[in-house]
Structures are given as C-alpha cells and as structure tokens.
Image: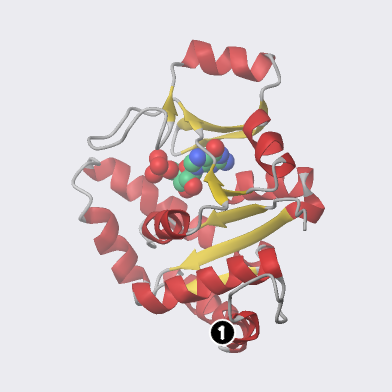
C-alpha cells in the first residue's frame, strides 16, 4: 500500500524534554526523517553541523530567504531559525514522515502550508520549577540566555490550544509511549491491519487515554502559575 508521509510537528517550551522524546522516536522508527533546521545561532558543544542543525551565517541565511528556500523561518531567542522546503517535499513524496522541532510560529506556518498532512504535538513540563531547573542545568547557556528562554517558554505555553495532542512529560517513559501511540496511529490508523504487525487498537486506546486525562487543564494551570 502506498502511503503519503506526513509532518509530525513537535513544539514545547525549552526544557520540557522534547529533544529526548523526538530523538527516541526517530531512533526506533525508520519511517521518519528529521527536519534539520538552519540557524544563525552559535553551535553548542556536542552539536553536529548538518545533523542537529545546519549552522550558517547571516549572509547565507539572507540568501536562502531571498531564494525562497524556506517553508518557514522566524527569529527565536534573538537568532534566526528556518525549515527548508525541499527535504519536506522529498520525504512526503517518498512516503516517509518528517519530524519537526520548531517553535509555535514555525508549527503554525508548517501546518498552514500542509494542512492535510500535518499533526501537531505539544510537550508540556510537569511544572514550572522543573522547567526552570532543567534550563539552568544546561550549563551551555549563560544566565541571561536562560532567563530569556524561561520567558519564551512561558509565552510558548500560551499556544497549547493550537496543537492536536498535548503530552505532559512528567516521566519520560509514559510520555514516550503516548508520543509513539500518536505517531503510529496517525501513520497506520486505529484498527487491526493484516499488513501491520502493531497493536493498533491498543495504541489508539493509549492515545485516547492521554486526551481523556485532560492535559489542556494541566496547561491552563501552568499558565496560571506563571501569572
Ligand atoms: P535551540 O536553540 O534551543 O535548539 O532551539 C530554540 C527554539 O527554536 C526551539 O523552540 C526550537 O523548537 C526552535 N526551532 C528550531 N528550529 C526551528 C525552525 O526551523 N523554525 C522555527 N520556527 N523554530 C525552530
């Protein structure tokens, strides 16, 4: 059966554990490609050029904008980040899915450009103290950068209503199981398929149990706490 791929767009405030979750999903599913964004922000220790991001200078970013190479681009935390169009079309046409780690602005733009082929997932932290301590424990960023990221995180939280699924990342394993269920049921459907060796109804039940746990109420509480 030929399947057109789809865009799995994942956003979260930084420090909510999105990278860990999405990297594991990628590692365990060879039907997904990662959209390697372009950015003008400096490379952090441990990051690989061309794998985590394409690290480029302002002049090259300007040229890519002029040449219409981006599906979307925005300024996030004072640096520019953009998603190239061509790899998306290539993955979808090959029946592969693509995962995106973008902020709410990027998520909105991509879902606007591929409305029928997009699924938006938002990862929520268990509470704001955890978020702040996860940001601070990233010794790679300076103190003012961390404060800026915390403010941006709270702003980002306000956009939870634009997403199809909300996942609270209180513990990694259950959060991952929900993300996996959301992904697999979008790709293969909810019902038993003779050609797919996956417990699709059970995965659909896990996905629906997450929705029934009312993660939106959790998001509203987080925002209320931030004042
Ligand atoms: P970081 O610098 O911590 O890797 O990412 C900062 C923020 O930029 C994150 O919220 C991440 O999701 C977002 N981001 C990364 N790549 C893109 C992109 O191509 N487009 C948009 N709009 N946001 C991005």
Q: Along the line of sight, which residue is nearer the eye, 4 or 110?
A: 4
Give the percent coordinates (x, y) of residue 82: 57, 32
Query: Which residue is tagged 1?
Result: 206
Please give the name of the residue rendered at 71% of the width and 54% of the height, measured from the top-left corner.
Answer: 118
In the displayed structure, 37 sits above or below 68; it is below
- Apparent side of residue 193 relative to residue 99 in the rendered image (left or right): right
Residue 158 visible in the picture: no
Q: Name the residue located 53 percent from the left edge and 55 percent from the top edge.
A: 11
Colouring used for the render: secondary structure
**Could one spot residue 20 in this view of the protein?**
yes
Q: Residue 199's image quarter?
A: bottom right
Q: Residue furthest front?
A: 194
Residue beneath the point at 23% across and 54% down: 136
Rendering coords of residue 3 (x, y %): 75, 54
Judge from the rendering whether residue 136 lies leftward or rightward of residue 94; answer left or right: left
Q: Position of residue 224 (x, y in %)?
A: 49, 75
């Amino acid at each position: 059966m030929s399947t057109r791929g789809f865009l799995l767009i994942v956003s979260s405030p930084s420090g909510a554990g999105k990278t860990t979750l999405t990297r594991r999903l990628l590692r365990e599913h060879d039907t997904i490609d990662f959209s390697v964004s372009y950015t003008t922000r400096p490379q952090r220790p441990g990051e690989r050029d061309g794998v985590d991001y394409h690290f480029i200078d302002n002049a090259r970013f300007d040229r890519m904008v002029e040449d219409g190479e981006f599906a979307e681009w925005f300024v996030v935390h004072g640096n520019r980040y953009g998603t190239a169009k061509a790899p998306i079309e290539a993955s979808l046409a090959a029946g592969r899915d693509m995962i995106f780690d973008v902020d709410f602005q990027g998520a909105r733009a991509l879902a606007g450009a591929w409305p029928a082929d997009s699924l938006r997932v938002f990862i929520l932290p268990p509470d704001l103290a955890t978020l702040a301590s996860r940001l601070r424990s990233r010794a790679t960023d300076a103190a003012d950068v961390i404060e800026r990221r915390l403010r941006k995180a709270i702003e980002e939280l306000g956009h939870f209503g634009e997403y199809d699924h909300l996942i609270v990342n209180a513990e990694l394993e259950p959060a991952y199981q929900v993300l996996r269920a959301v992904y697999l049921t979008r790709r293969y459907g909810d019902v038993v398929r003779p050609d797919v060796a996956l417990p699709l109804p059970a995965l659909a039940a896990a996905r629906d149990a997450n929705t029934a746990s009312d993660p939106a109420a959790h998001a509203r509480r987080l925002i209320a706490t931030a004042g």
